[in-house]
Image (cartoon, grey):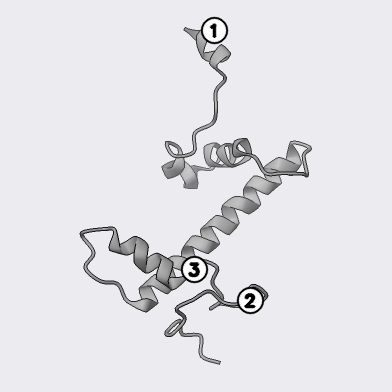
Amino acid sequence: MDASPAGSEGAASPGSKGPTALIITVNRVKNLVKEDAEIKSISTEACFAVAKATELFLEGLASKAAAHMQAAGRADSLEYADVAAVVAESEALDFLGDVVPQTVKAAALLASA
């Protein structure tokens, strides 16, 4: 079987797995890239690579946040605080610090002022 993303315009079926299975479609990536005026065109292979890399990144972030949730003694739902804690604790995720900051209660801010 060819592992090439050529011709993989849509998402793979939900049950499919493997190196070419995508949840984020190539067309969605192309539409996002079109928003950047500096990029005139992008190949299907580059869109596939961006989509797959994004999926893998999000899978890792969600897994770490789920581990944080379980360590906090919760097993029902992932919360913003779990994701923010993973971002704050990981040097590799420092670039997300301004996008996913840890929340601070207003009372704590007022008390420190």
What element does badge 3 sit on?
helix
Is 101 above or below relative to 19? above
Rendering coords of residue 24 (x, y %): 50, 66
Labels 3 and 2: the sequence-earlier one: 2
Residue 111, labelled with which disc? Answer: 1
Is 30 above or below relative to 107? below
Left/right placement of residue 35 relative to residue 74 reads: left
Residue for badge 2 = 17
Q: Which residue shows up at 42% across the image and 66% down it?
A: 28
Looking at the picture, which amino acid does disc 3 mark? Lys
Rendering coords of residue 65 (x, y %): 64, 46
Left/right placement of residue 98 relative to residue 16 reads: left
Q: Which residue shows up at 68% across the image and 42% down it?
A: 68
Dot 2 alpha-carbon crowd within 10 angstroms: few under 14, some 14 to 19, many 20 or more: few
Looking at the picture, which amino acid does disc 2 mark? Lys
In the picture, the quarter occupied by the N terminus is bottom right
Q: Which residue shows up at 47% across the image and 7% down it?
A: 113
Looking at the picture, which amino acid does disc 1 mark? Ala
What element does badge 2 sit on?
loop
Measure the alpha-carbon separation of dots 3 and 1.
Answer: 45 Å
Left/right placement of residue 22 relative to residue 36 reads: right
The residue lying toward the viewer, choosing from 33 and 65, is 33
Measure the alpha-carbon separation of dots 3 and 2.
Answer: 12 Å
